[in-house]
Amino acid sequence: MKKARPIRIMIAEDHLIARKGLGAIINAQPDMKVIAEATNGKEAIALYRQHEPDVTLIDIRMPVVTGFDAVAAIRAEFPNAHFVAISTFGGDEDIRRALAVGAQSFLTKDTPNDDLINAIRAVYSGQKYLPPSVASALTENSARPSLTAREIEILRLIVQGLSNKEIAYTVGIANYTVYNHVKSILEKLGAADRTQASTIAIMRGIVHLHH
């Protein structure tokens, strides 16, 4: 009897240990094989063109070109491409954005091996796959009022450690306007202070720290 062709998988992940760990889990499956490894989003796009894998596991926060941008670029060229987005954090904004650019699944890096394998099989067969923790992260903050573009701009500067005065100078608005924006940001995020607001912003994926 002819053996079925394995699911051909590309891993795009900039951290060597994480990449090799994922590869070991996948290659241990009788019906899966890692055929390419990328260390950034630009490499992922080039290797996708070269190999056209069945499923791509892609870290959304990578250098050179982000995972988000790589997925969007590949999907524009290959509309039937299948992606499992992976991230250290399971922030609702990251999940929404990953699904919006075309990923069919989203997993955090502490996901059990079984969930990883189930996600790959589901996505390969054309289904979406969100484990319960990811699905609950999406609904948890959906009732919260969303931040305006200006508030997100100011939140980025808060995360960088700028004071109200420095933010006012950088953005070109009055001090009291910054104060009002910061107050609104804390309320919307449910944060007690700027430090907590920064943590929430990073964890939820509202603000990304650059590599």
Image: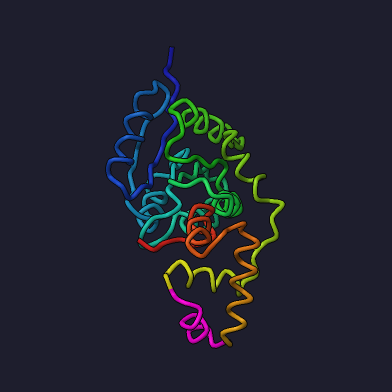
The one nearer the camera, 149 or 125, is: 149
Q: Quadrant of residue 46?
A: bottom left
Identify the image quadrant of the N terminus. top left
Give the answer, above or below, for where 109 lies relative to 184: above
Question: Can residue 172 be found in the magenta stretch?
Answer: yes
In this image, 125 relative to 209: left or right?
right
Question: Magenta segment range?
Answer: 162-173
Q: Nearer the viewer, residue 85 or 47?
A: 85
> Which residue is pictured at 47% across the width and 47% down the height?
89
Left or right, 145 with reference to 20: right
Q: Is residue 186 magenta?
A: no
Q: Could you tell me residue 108's position as x and y percent?
A: 47, 41
Residue 164 in view: yes
The correct choice, above or below, for 18 with respect to 205 in the image is above
Q: Is residue 4 shown above or below 38? A: above
Q: Would you say 148 lies left or right of 4 here?
A: right
Q: Residue at x 33, y 44 (%)?
A: 37
Give the position of the C terminus as an image quadrant. bottom left
Q: Is residue 73 visible?
A: no
Horizontal and vertical percent position of residue 136:
63, 39
Q: Is residue 145 left or right of residue 196?
A: right
Locate residue 130, reporting x and y percent. Answer: 59, 37
User: Can you say whether 89 is above or below 179 in the image?
Assistant: above
Residue appearing at x 61%, y 53% in the figure: 100
